[in-house]
Image: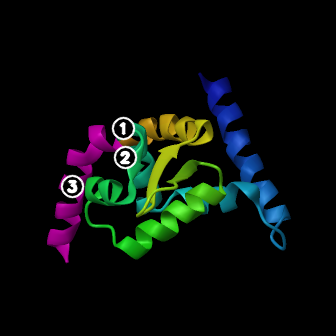
Amino acid sequence: METKAIATDKKFQNIFEHANATKNGVCPVRDIIARISDKWTLLSIYALGGYGKMRFNELKHRIGDVSQRMLTVTLRNLESDGLVLRKVYPEVPPRVEYELTDLGLSLMHQMEYIIDWANTNSQEIIKRRKKVGNKK
């Protein structure tokens, strides 16, 4: 068990060493994590993964409190990164559908671990937040 922990520690240390060595350039890990870690991106990916192909307003409805502008920016970023496919149908008015690509699906499957962790630990975290909030 200790050997595995040391290997994991070394893996994370290497990530930071690489990031610090590329301060003047773009660290791919930091760049990608920054892009995919905001809540609208995570919720968009999870909604598309859970419900499949959707039109813009349906996706907006599934996510809930996202603004039209923020969802538009999020979907453009996801499309440019190859995580979401945007398909426009030549109809009047045009119909546009969004769906995850294979790359997007692979990210969603990794996100499942974080979502499961959040669901499992949410009560403990909320309890601690309330405890800290009462000290103020």
Residue 113 coordinates in the image, percent (x, y): 44, 36
Identify the residue at image location x=28%, y=41%. Answer: 119
Highlighted range, magenta: 116-136
Which residue matches tag 1? 50
Q: Which residue is mark 2?
A: 47
CB under 8 Å between discs 1 and 2: yes
Residue 29 in the image, given as x and y percentages of width and height: 70, 54
Residue nearer the viewer, 72 or 103: 72
Task: Kindly state the secondary structure of the residue where label 2 is placed.
Answer: helix
Relative image position of residue 80 (x, y in whole percent) = 65, 59
Mark 3 or 1, nearer chain start: 1
Q: Nearer the viewer, residue 10 or 58?
A: 58
Identify the secondary structure beneath mark 3: helix
Q: Quadrant of residue 68?
A: bottom left
Q: Hey, which quadrant is residue 33 in on the image?
A: bottom right
- The residue under the point 47% across, 62% down is 38
Amino acid carrying label 1: it is Gly
For the point 43% across and 72% down, which residue is it? 70
